[in-house]
Image: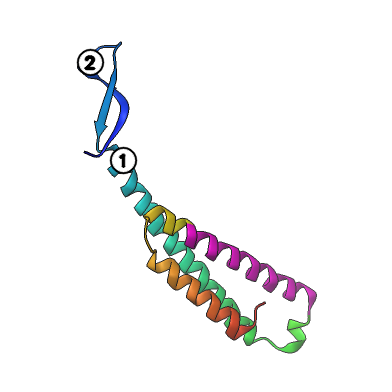
Amino acid sequence: MNTVPGLSRRGGHTCGVCGPVPGISQEIEKRHARLGCRLGWVSLILAVLFVLGGIFRAEMTPEVLNLEDVRMGFGILGVVSAMGVHLLLFVAEGLRGRDAPKAVWALLLFWIGFIVFGLW
């Protein structure tokens, strides 16, 4: 039986031993799975933005790329994307209790963009 002990009173008395409440852990698992799915989507969107930033950077002229503000902007994009995609991947997998397919695709897109566009 899927129960959490100690959350309900037996017999409705105010004093006495607390008994199990069925179904609470299933509800929590469902909530975690939904949150993990959402985090997987966020991770995928962040990876797509990273790839779009790489495409945008590849189309810029060398004169614009040599500007300090432009380099700093792309550096911040790369660092935030790297940390965000990886963190969201691991959190989504942990919450769902299994592989999070969208987060795995996000990680794959991130590393392809990282290598192809040289955003390191």
What residue appears at the point 54 percent right and 64 percent down from the top-left corner? 86
Q: Amino acid at mark 2?
A: Gly
Indicate the position of residue 90 as horizontal and vertical percent values.
48, 60
Label 1: state its secondary structure.
Answer: helix
The residue shown at (48%, 76%) is 108
Percent x, y of residue 43: 48, 64
- Name the residue carrying label 2: 12
- Judged left or right of residue 3, residue 79 is right
> Callout 2 environment at 10 Å: few (<14), some (14 to 19), or many (20+)?
few
In which quadrant of the rendered image does the C terminus lie? bottom right
Residue 80 located within the stretch drawn in magenta: yes
Image quarter hosting the N terminus = top left
Q: Is residue 60 above or below residue 51?
A: below
Counting labels gives 2
Give the number of the disc on residue 25. Answer: 1
Q: Regarding mark 2 in the picture, which secondary structure is present there?
A: helix
First to last magenta residue range: 67-90
Residue 71 is marked as none
Vertical placement of 70 versus 89: above or below? below
Dividing the picture into quadrants, the one containing residue 36 is bottom left
The disc, 2 or 1, on the residue closer to the chain's N-terminal end is: 2
- Residue type highlighted by circle 1: Ser
Percent of width and height locating residue 101:
38, 68
Task: Return the x and y of residue 62 as percentages of the image width and height.
Answer: 74, 88
Classified by dominant secondary structure, the portion drawn in magenta counts as helix
* Near-viewer residue (49 or 111): 111
* 38 displayed left or right of 119: left
Tell me how far mark 2 sits from mark 1, CA to CA.
22 Å
**Residue 68 lies in what quarter of the image?**
bottom right
